[in-house]
Image: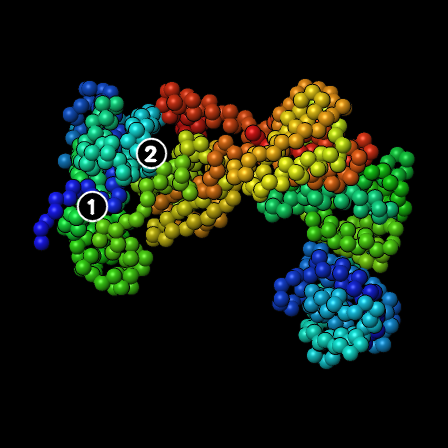
Amino acid sequence: MKVRIDKASLLVPLYRAQGVVDRKNTTNVAACVHIAADDVGLSFSATDYEVAVQTEVAAEVIDAGAALVHGRALYDIVRGLPDGSTVLLSTDANHRLRIEAGRAYYHLNGIGPEEFPPDAIADTAGARGLVCDKSQIESMLKRTLFSVSSDESRPALNGVLLEIEPESTGQVRLRMVSTDGHRLSKVERTVAASDYDGQRHRCIVHRRGAQELLRILEGSDPSVRIEFIGQNAIFSSDKARLQVRRIEENFPDYARVIPDRGDTSVTIPTAALLGAIRRVSNLGTVKDPLLRVDLDDGRIALEMHYTDFGEAHEEIELPDWTGPKLKVGFNPKYLQDVCNVLGTESITIEMSDQFSPCLVHADEDPGAVFVVMPMRL
Amino acid sequence: MDSIDVPKTSAWSRIIMHADMDAFYAAVEQRDRPELRGKPLLIGMDHPRSVVTTASYEARPFGVGSAMPMAVAKRKCPQALIIPPRIGYYSTVSQQIMTEFEHFSPYVEPLSLDEAFLDMTGAQRLFGTPHDMARALKQEVFRKVQLRVSVGVACCKYVAKVASDLGKPDGLLVVEPDDTLDFLHPLPISRLWGVGKHGEGLLLALGLRTIGDVARSDPKFLVERLGSLGAHIFALSLGQDPRKVVSDREAQSIGSEDTLAVDVRGYEAILPHLLHAADQVAWRLRRAGLIAHGVRVKLKSASFKIHTRQAVLRPGSHNADDLYAAAQTLLHQFDLREPMRLVGLTAYDMRDQQLPVQEDLFTSADRRKRQNLDVAVDSLAQRFGRGTVKRGSDLH
C-alpha cells in the first residue's frame, strides 16, 4: 500500500476511530485502525466488537493495499505533524506502516490486515430505517447523553433509548430517553424524513455508540441515515458509518416516573439559577453534595452546608410562581446539567412534595422534559 | 535496689473486659419460671434434627452442651426438660443488658446476644481497680435483670475472653498484666482463639499440648507448618492481641456469622442462615443509625477453606430484605458443591443514616414503604421484644 494525503483529511477518520479503539498499549485488533486503499480512495475502520466505525476519505492512491496499526499511536503522530503537511503512508512486507511528512518519518509496527474482522460493519442491504436532518439527532443526543448511567450492573441504563414512530402527517416521531436511576431525560421531535420504512423502531444505543455518533455528526453532511439490521443499529453520515450493537435489555417504563405536572411550579431565569448553584456549591468537595432548595412565596433560596467550611445561601426573586411552599434537597449537579443542556432563557421546575420526582422543562423547548429525583433530607 | 510501691493498675496498658452471660437462654427461663429453677434444662426444639442452643448448669454434669444434637442430649440426660427457645424475648433482655454495659463504657462491642467486650481503659477514677469495675458491672447487671454474668478482665481481648470462660459460672477473674503468661501457659492449646478441633489436631501432631509449649516454640517453625495460623497463635501465646474494642457505631463493618451445628450443602440449604444473618445485621445497623453500601457473604467449607464474595449495595440500606437480596445474588457466585460449616453476612461501607440519600426514580416508593415497615417492626420489638413480629417464611 502507498498513498498520499494531506494532514487535515487524514486526521478526520483517525479522530473518529479514537472513541472505539482500545487505548491500551498492546497492539491487538481492538486497539488498531484498519486502513484500506483501493481505486476509490482510503477507508479507515475500527471495532471493539460492540461499536464499529468506518470512514472513507479521498486520497491519491499510488498502490492499493491494507494495513492494521495501533489507532491511538497513529492519531498522535498525525496530529503532531505541522499543519498543511502532505503525508505519505506506505507499508512493508512486515506489516509496518511508514508515515512520512517532509523530513520526518515514523514506522509503526502492525499486524496482518486480514486479521481485522471482514464483517465488522454489516452490509446494510435489506436494512430498514430512515434518513433525517442530523441537527435534530445531534440536539436530542446532547439532551440525553448526560444522564446515561455508567453503572455496569444496570445494563439497560447504559445507553440512550431511541424510539422511532410514524406520524399521521407522514412525518416521523423521534424520541430519545435516558436515565441513571436518579434522573431522566426525554426528548421528542417530529421531523421530516426520507427513505422511511414506516415502521416503529426501538433500540437502546450504548453510551459509547451515542458518543461516537456525535463525533461523526460533526462533519459537513446535513443528514444522517439510521438503519436497523439484525442486532445492530447503523448510522451513516458524511462518508462515515457507525455500527452499534443494541443493548438487549428492557428499558424501564419511563412514562411511569414522569409526572404530568407538580402542585408547585416556578419559572427561573436559567443564567441566574446556574450562577447561584455554582457559587453555593463551590465551597468544597463533598462526597454526596446536598443542595437545599427552599421554595417560598416569590423566591427560591439555595443553601449548602459544609462541615469544614461553613455554609452558603443565595436567593433569587421569582415573579412567576404558583402553588404551595416547599423544601427539598437535590444533587446540585443534576440541576446544573439540565440547565446546561437546555440552554434556554428560563426553566420551569414543577414538583408536588419533597419525596416525588421533580419535573424540569422549558417553554422554548417543548419536546424536552427532565425528571430529577430529590435527595432525602 | 529498693522496691517502690507502685499501684498495680499502673501496668495496665489497656483494660479490656469480656462479659458473658451464664447459660443465658436457660437462665432467662429459670428467672421467669421459678418451677424450672434447679432443674436440668435443654433449650431447643424437641425435634430429631434439632440442636441444643443452651443447656442449664444443672444439665451440664451429664455431658451435654450447646450445639449438641437434641437426640444425643436427651440420651445423655433423659430427665432434662426441653424448652423451646424464645429468641425474640431473649433479644429484648439482651438489649437491656447491653444498655447497662453502655453505662460503664462508651466502647461496647456486642459479639452476640449474651456476650460483649468493653474497653474500660481510663475508667479507674470512676470505678476503681479492674476488680472493682468487674464487681460493679456484675452487681448492676444482676440488679437490672436478675441474671448472672461472668466477667474476665485483662490487657487484651483474647486473655479477657479466656478469663471469663475459666471463671464460669458467676465468675470474676482479673488477669494482672504481669501475670498474663503464668495464666496462659498451663492452659491446653484448645484455649487458643482460632484453634478448633482441626487446628488442635495439627498442633498435637507437632507435639504442642499447652499454650506454653506454643510460646516456647520457634515462630518460624510454626509459620512454616501452619501458615498464618502459626503467626497468629504464637502472638496469642505471648498474650499479644492488639484488636481494639469496636462499637457498631464506629465499626468499619457489621457482620453476623454462625458455625453451624450440622454442615449444610447447596444453595437452598444455605439461604435460611443468610436470612437470619441479614436480620441480625440489619437490626444492628439500624440500632447504630447506619446505612450500609456494601454486602459481603462468607462461607467456610467443611475442609476449612474460607470463601468470600462482596458487592456494592446501591442504594445503601439497613433493611434485611435488601441485604438478603444482595446476599442471594452473591451466593450464586460460589462453588456450592462442598458442604459448608460456617455462613456469614457482613455489611460494610457504612454511612450515617442522617446523611442525605439520593432517592431512586424507579424504586423509591417501594423503599419508603419498607422503611416504614422497619420502623414499625423496630418499635414493636422495643415494646414487646424482638421476634414479636416474625417473617412469614419463619412460620413453617
Q: Which residue is mark 2?
A: B106
Label annotation for residue B181: none
Please state which of residues A281 and A162 is positioned toward the viewer in this rendering: A281
Secondary structure at numbered mark 2 = loop
Q: Position of residue B178 (x, y in %)?
A: 17, 48
Up the image or down, A89 lies above or below B89; here it is below
Please state which of residues B24 and B304 is positioned toward the viewer in this rendering: B24
The chain holding disc 1 is B
Asked whether, in this view, residue B237 is left or right of residue B308, the answer is left
- Mark 1 residue type: Ala
Q: Are marks 1 and 2 on the same chain?
A: yes
Q: Which quadrant: the C terminus of chain B?
A: top left
Q: Which quadrant: the N terminus of chain B?
A: bottom left
Q: Quadrant of residue A276?
A: top right
Up the image or down, A297 lies above or below A50; here it is above
Q: Does the rendering let one see residue B69?
A: no
- Mark 2 residue type: Pro
Look at the image and name its color scheme.
Answer: rainbow
Asked whether, in this view, residue A227 is left or right of residue B6, the answer is right
The chain holding disc 2 is B
Secondary structure at numbered mark 1 = helix
Asked whether, in this view, residue A234 is left or right of residue B249, the answer is right
Q: Does the rendering let one see residue A372?
A: yes
Q: Residue at x 23, y 36 (%)?
A: B124
Q: In the current view of this chain or complex, which residue is farthest to the bottom?
A: A93
Marks 1 and 2, Cα distance to the nearest angstrom?
22 Å
Q: In the current view of this chain or complex, which residue is farthest to the front?
A: B2
Please state which of residues B315 and B83 is positioned toward the viewer in this rendering: B315
Q: Quadrant of residue B360?
A: top right
Q: Quadrant of residue B158?
A: top left
Q: Which residue is mark 1?
A: B11
Q: Comparing marks 1 and 2, which lies closer to the viewer? A: 1
